Amino acid sequence: MIGNKTLAVPGPTNMPSRIAQSMAIPLEDHRAPDFPDFVTPLLADLKKVFRTETGRVLVFPGSGTGGWEAALRNTLSAGDGVLASSFGQFSDLWVQMCRQLDLNVTCFDQTWGRATPLDSYRQALEADSRHSIKAVLVCHNETATGVTSDVAAVRAMLNDLDHPALLFVDGVSSIGSIEFNMDQWGVDVAVSGSQKGFMLPTGLAIVGVSEKVLYQIKNVSLRPGDTYLGCGYFDFTHMATANDNGYFPYTPAATLLRGLRTSVDMLLEEGLDNVFARHHRLAEGVRRAVTAWGLRTCAETADIHSDTVTAIRVADGTNANDVIQAAYHNYGVSLGAGLSKVAGKVFRIGHLGWLNEAMVLQALGGAELAMRDAGIPFEAGSGVGAAVMHFTSPQKQVLMAAE
């Protein structure tokens, strides 16, 4: 196919040439005496992205799934209670991992398109008088359905009930793209990955860990009779101890770390608040396109719309996979597929990372071409036009001037 392909999935995302160039270097000695001069300021600046002053950010070779496992293995013992909810592919996979590790999971299954059920969480925590629930899981941004949950509300609930459970957050498709405040929200472990808001190839599990968690791991012995899950590869203490000296406990993905350095620089240069505003502006353009097409999002209400990915429902009797196939094979546009319960019912447009208005319009135009080929009725150009109107509104001009 002539021309560049368009990557419009919610991860991996577009990689800036600046990041690619920063990784195009000879391999280096990760035990070199000057390696800490690179590692120490990188880890310090990662804390700014997570917005934590008291916690730490640990970087493991792996993916977000490895970060999930790290959160569980470092803090919990077999049989510990975990409060969770399943409302999409990735929130559900984290629940499945908990069960595989013999944790005692209380899971609220939600209709896909809804968010973390705050009322159900409160009822479960109120009933937990013995504090058998040791961890509460929140999928901040459910990538499969384009839904964002209220992490701060869960922390406020825990504080209000004086419940000691740890708060774990899946921020794989949120951190570095939409508002996330680790310290302010009282998050104990926050999991992210390199291939989304950090604009890198897959290969790094980037995990924020609170001071509270590190203290407990270091100072609290196991309760009698507990079966400790064991940390192994993902041991927080081993990683933190090695990082104190600017090194890693085993061979790090040094080339990716060089790219991560540039990624963090770019995020901080733009300013995190500006990053969040840009993602919201781009996401709103996509949502207005969906409305103009006469379709609707998988997210059931506007207050839980994701600013990093939009899952778009097609009409009954229509197969969303026809749109995805036409987009890829006919026009070189990669759209996200519906997963599990929404397979064939939605196609997804990712709008996160290294992205601007013209790139969003390219994805929307490709989606329109593919929908025409798939026989989905809509007025050609309506979605692109709605996005253009949004992107060129007077408010947009004010925002651009402020930047």
Image (cartoon, helix red, strand yellow):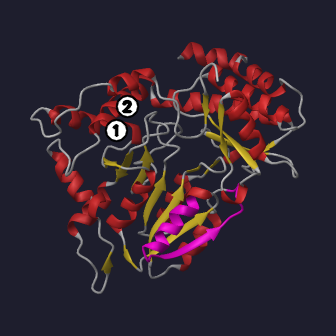
Q: Position of residue 273 (x, y in %)?
A: 50, 30
Residue 185 belongs to magenta span = no
Q: Is residue 349 above or below residue 223?
A: above
Nearer to me, 10 or 394 = 10
Which numbered disc flags the more N-terminal residue, 2 or 1? 1
Residue with the most extreme left position: 33
CA separation, marks 2 and 1?
A: 7 Å
Rendered image: mark on residue 264: 2
Dot 2 lies on which element?
helix
Residue with the most extreme front position: 1
Which residue lies at the image location 84% right of the left edge and 26% below the top edge?
A: 382
Q: Is residue 370 above or below residue 148?
A: above
Q: Position of residue 371 (x, y in %)?
A: 81, 35
Which residue lies at the image location 74% right of the left edge and 20% below the top edge?
A: 388
Which residue lies at the image location 44% right of the left edge and 77% below the top edge?
A: 102
Report whether residue 45 is seen. Answer: no
Which quadrant is the N terminus positioned in?
top right
Q: Tell me which segment is drawn in magenta.
A: 91-114
Query: Please, what is the three-letter code of the amino acid marked with disc 1?
Result: Leu
Q: Position of residue 174 (x, y in %)?
A: 52, 43
Q: Which residue is mark 1?
A: 46
Residue 102 belongs to magenta span = yes
Q: Is residue 166 left or right of residue 249?
A: right
Label pair 2/1, CB-CB below 8 angstroms: yes
Residue with the most extreme bottom position: 225
Dot 1 lies on which element?
helix
Q: Position of residue 342 (x, y in %)?
A: 72, 55
Q: Is residue 368 left or right of residue 131?
A: right
